[in-house]
Image: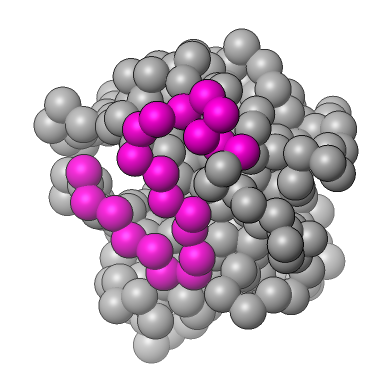
Amino acid sequence: MRVTVLGAGTSIPAKGHSPAGIYVQIAREHILLDAGPGTWQRLERAGAPWHQLDRIFLTHFHVDHSLDLVSILASLRLPPVKRKKPLHVYGPPGLKRLYRTLNAAYLDKLSPRGYRVVFHELQRATLRLPGYAVRSVPMNHYETKAIGYRLTAAGKTLAYSGDTDVCEGVVELGRGADALILECSVPDERKVEGHLTPSKCGRIAAEAGCRRLVLTHFYPVFKGYDIRARVRYAYRGRLTLAKDFTTIQL
Ligand SMILES: [Zn+2]
Ligand SMILES: [Zn+2]
């Protein structure tokens, strides 16, 4: 499993920290976890075969995680792409309504041509896919019904929280994972509801017992704060602070 963070930030423009998106090569498939603005272009920049994309797993529908669903559907229908295989899109309840609303707003220019798009609405679910399994677990992120994803292939497990505040679900999501990717939005001194801070990420990682912790989704308010030191209050495992295009191999 090869994992590339395509966006380690939020909707606020910040160098090296674009909106949320993660590219995963898993078994024989190419998948995206979230699709914030610019993810589709950065997927191409990462050298991925974007036209072969098999599945998109959205954690929730905030713009910084979902807007490029529009770009993806608008481009895959164009004749030069010659796409045949179906595209599966997963997300919390409301996904199908979101698609219908966006497609109406864009005057039907998202409707697939020459291939199929299949939408799957999930909360707590386990999916058996070709060569790997995916589990979705409810997170704690305002009223969004947000879910995190846990992917397992060939005995290796990757977990990704999307956006969340502290909850039992996020510990369950990362339990014993080879890599846990957590959102880390703001410093401890500037905690906001619905998001995590470095010390909370450290505590979650320690409780989950994950082998490696990768932090992402940094708002540009961290200047002058020592993120690593705060994580280290609780967590002693391998720690990576993601930037755009940070890649890990499991
Ligand atoms: Zn969000
Ligand atoms: Zn977000």
Q: Which quarter of the picture shows residue 132?
A: top left
Q: Which residue is drawn at the image coordinates 69% and 22% (left, top)?
A: 166
Is residue 138 part of the magenta span, yes or no? Answer: no
Q: Which residue is drawn at the image coordinates 34% and 40% (left, top)?
A: 238
Q: Nearer the viewer, residue 168 or 38?
A: 168
**Residue 171 x, y percent position in the rendering:** 52, 17
Left/right of residue 129 with respect to residue 239 in the rendered view: left
Compared with 52, 24 (above or below) is above
Q: Which residue is drawn at the image coordinates 50% and 79% (left, top)?
A: 41
Compared with 172, 225 (above or below) is below
Q: Nearer the viewer, residue 82 or 212?
A: 212
Is residue 234 part of the magenta span, yes or no? Answer: yes
Q: Which quarter of the picture shows residue 223?
A: bottom right
Q: Is residue 119 visible?
A: no
Left/right of residue 208 with respect to residue 162 in the rendered view: left
Left/right of residue 220 with respect to residue 158 in the rendered view: right
Q: Which quarter of the picture shows residue 126?
A: top left
Span of residues in magenta: 230-250
